[in-house]
Every structure is written in C-alpha cells, then in structure tokens.
Image (spheres, rainbow, N blue to C red):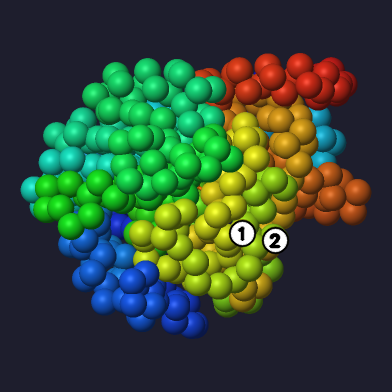
Amino acid sequence: MKKRVHVNLPVEELPKSWYNVKADLPFKMDPPMNPATGEIMNPMDMTAIFPKSIVEQEISEERFIDIPEAILDEYAVFRPTPLIRATFLEEFLRTPARIYYKYEGTSPTGSHKTNTALAQAYYNSIEGVTELATETGAGQWGSALSYAGRKFGLNVRIFMVRVSYESKPMRQHMMGMFNGTVEPSPSINTESGRNFLTDERNYPGSLGMAISEAVEIVLNSEKKKYSLGSVLDHVLLHQTVIGLEIEKQLAILGEKPSVILGCHGGGSNFGGTILPFVKRKLQGDELELIACEPESCPSLSKGEFRYDFGDSAGLTPKVKMYTLGKDFVPPSIHAGGLRYHGAAPIISRLVHEKLVTPEAFPQDETFKAGILFATTEGIIPAPEACHAIAGAIRRAREARDRNEEKVIVFTLSGHGLLDLSSYTSILESNEKLLEFEGVKG
Ligand SMILES: *Cc1c(COP(=O)(O)O)cnc(C)c1O
C-alpha cells in the first residue's frame, strides 16, 4: 500500500492559547478612526457594537491569550483538525514538491468560521448579551454563528447577501436548523437597507451592505451586539489555532515550509494560518506567504492602502486596509465568501510591508483546481478554498519546471458539499474544466 500521511493530533495537543502577532511585529498598527469625528477612536467606543471582552482582545498586545475552558471544550468537538499530504495531487502534477493541506472542513458547519464563532458567542454570553446580529455572504459565517449562538444560548439574526440567499438555499436550512433567523439583504427592515434599495444596482447586495444592516440594529444596545466573521484583529486572533496546529504537525513530520497559502476574503483563515509563521519570516527564514484572492474582487492586489469603512453605509469605524472602496459591488462570483471590498488591517499591513504576497485567480482556474482536487484527494472544496488550491497548484508546477523540492502548505478552509450547484453551473458554462488526463496517469 502507498504511504499516505495524515497527521491527526490527539485532543491534548489542542493549542491552549491564541497567538497575537501584534506582540512580535516591528511596527505599530494604524488605529481605527471614529466615523463621526474622523479622529483616532477611543477603543471603548467600540463597545457600542461589541462586548467589552472582545474589544479588549481587539486592542491587546499580549503575545498569547488563554482560550477559556468552555471554548476549548467546544473546539475539542472537531479540533485539532488534520494536516494531510496531498500525495495523489502531487502524483498527478508530477511535482517534486510536497504538498500539505490543513483541512478545516471537518468543523460542525463545514468551515474554519466556527473557530471564531464559538469564541464570540461565548464572550457575548458571559456579558449578558441575548442577541447577535451579523451578515453573511455565502452563508458559512451565518451557519457557524447560528451553531455557536445555539450552544451558548443566544438568538442570532443574519442578513444574507441577496444573491447568495437566492442561490444557496441549503445554507438557509442549516441556519434555521440551529435556530438562526435569516433574511435577504438589502432588506426593507432597516434604514440602511431601505436606502440601498433606492438604487436598483444594489439589489443583489454585498457584504458591505449586509454589515450596515446588522450594525444598525445593535447600535448602542446593551442586550444586542454585532458579530463579525472576518477582517478584525480579534477574529484573526481566534483563527490562529489553525496555524498553531500546523506548526506542531509540521514539526512532527520534520518539515520546514517554503510556501504557505490560503484563500483571502476578509483575511481570517489566511491570517489564522500564516500569523504564527510571520515571526520566522521576520527572522529571515525563506518563506513565501501567499494570499489567494479572486480576480473579480482583488482587494489586496488592486485595492488602495488607506482608511476606509468596513461597511457600505459608513456606520463602522474606519480602518486602514487595502480597499476597492466601500461602494464597490463585486460581481456575483460563486465564491461568495470572497466578495468583500476590503481586507483585514493586519494582512493589509503585512502586504504593504512585503511580508505577504497577494495573488489573484480567474474563476475558471479555481474551479478547475477544485474539481482536480476533489478527483485526486477525495474532498469537494468550498469555492473559496479552491483559490488556495489553485495557488498551491501554480507553485507545485513551478517547482516541477525548476525541479525544486519545495514544501507547500495551504489551508483548505471548508468543504463544498452545499456548493455543488456552483460547480454545475460553472461546468455548464465551460465544459473544458473537466478536461484533464485520467488521474491515475
Ligand atoms: C468565509 C469563508 C472564506 C473567506 O473568509 P476569510 O475571512 O478570508 O477566511 C473562505 N473560505 C471559506 C470556506 C469561508 O467560509
């Protein structure tokens, strides 16, 4: 039998703290700005929408932040997640590179989002919050937060970008099953939503618009808070369990990564994956960190690095990030989770400092990579995750052409079992995507 490498850590190896990269960065991050005054924000103003403990994490400079017992217990339901060597994909590509993927699709709702959803639900619940409002693109975040809210006794109200609401009914069923309440955005139930709807071009919605609606209904409420599934520092912090586990798993194999990749929407799975490795890069290790994004929403590769709002109505603090502009309405690509005008401030700064390299991919290349991955490795990837696979394949082919023995590691952020209709419609538009040789060569 062929040797197959799956590194499954025992539950005792679950990281007991999250890693805060800000403790190790040789520069200070630009602070958020108050949208009303245009001045540097008093962090505690953020308690208008977030619980205090989350705001404290957002601004913390501590290197390690302990994960509370109640969250560890929930993580243990599905973590540590496996690191798998993609031997069949390597064989197909005839590459001398070794390709490893960290699989986050084993989480209860099928993506990495549960890592922060559980943490946020927990902190809100201990501060007496009873309802969380949020936005969701493809529905992954709404599902994760509904699950987490249900665990910790919170009601969850979700504004779902309308194009996804209409094209991904299965995600609605999942949110409903965990008692989440979901409505298409822009909706007529908020002032921001009604304003957006006065321009029909806004009808398909965007993450930026959905964020405005969710923020609006919690502003200055004690019992209702807002929860964001990506972009902010505390979200990336919670996601570092991914990279911390990868570190342990690679150490067991005695491997040193040469390239680490992840798909990039708001930056949370990518940040969670690479942040624990940034220190090595600062110390001079030869290590490429690559953020894979769609060509149709290329915030990091084509955006401007400046202060901008996180939402479309301008209700959130302004943060310094790569942005395509808050009014940018991305085309309705299938990877709904990557349709965001901005990017995480931490990742943006790392790109600006040339520690992280962005790379953009056309949709057909990502789906072709996804279909090849499903066929070789036996996991149907989420359309978002297909971007990371496409990035890994580009690097593996490059290694073949140069005959280089590289170690390529990427995070497979979620499975695509609820995205099969996207695969079908892509295949209908381009049959060539199935044209690759038999995978057994
Ligand atoms: C939400 C989502 C993404 C994009 O969000 P990030 O914050 O950039 O990670 C990527 N993959 C999957 C499976 C998602 O659900």
Mark carried by residue 324: 1
Name the residue type under label 1: Leu
Query: For disc 1, does the CB lie below 8 Å from ligand 1?
Result: no
Residue drawn at x 27%, y 72% is 43
Q: Nearer the viewer, residue 4 or 62?
A: 62
Question: Residue 233 falls in which quadrant of the image?
Answer: bottom left
Mark carried by residue 302: 2
- Specify the farthest residue to the left: 128
Q: Is residue 111 in sight in this rendering?
A: no
SS class, disc 2: helix
Q: Nearer the viewer, mark 1 or mark 2?
A: 1
Question: Residue 365 falls in which quadrant of the image?
Answer: top right
Depicted 381 relative to depicted 245: above or below: above
Residue 76 in percent (x, y) is at 29, 37
CB atoms of marks 1 and 2 within 8 Å: yes
Residue drawn at x 23%, y 55% is 219
Name the residue type under label 2: Lys
Q: Nearer the viewer, residue 220 or 31?
A: 220
SS class, disc 1: loop
Residue drawn at x 49%, y 60% is 344
Residue 429 in percent (x, y) is at 78, 21
Residue drawn at x 63%, y 23% is 422
How far apart are labels 1 and 2 at the CA level? 7 Å
Q: Nearer the viewer, residue 298 or 286?
A: 298
Q: Is residue 313 in sight in this rendering?
A: yes
Q: Is residue 223 left or right of residue 347?
A: left
Q: Residues within 10 Å of mark 2 (few under 14, many from 20)?
A: some
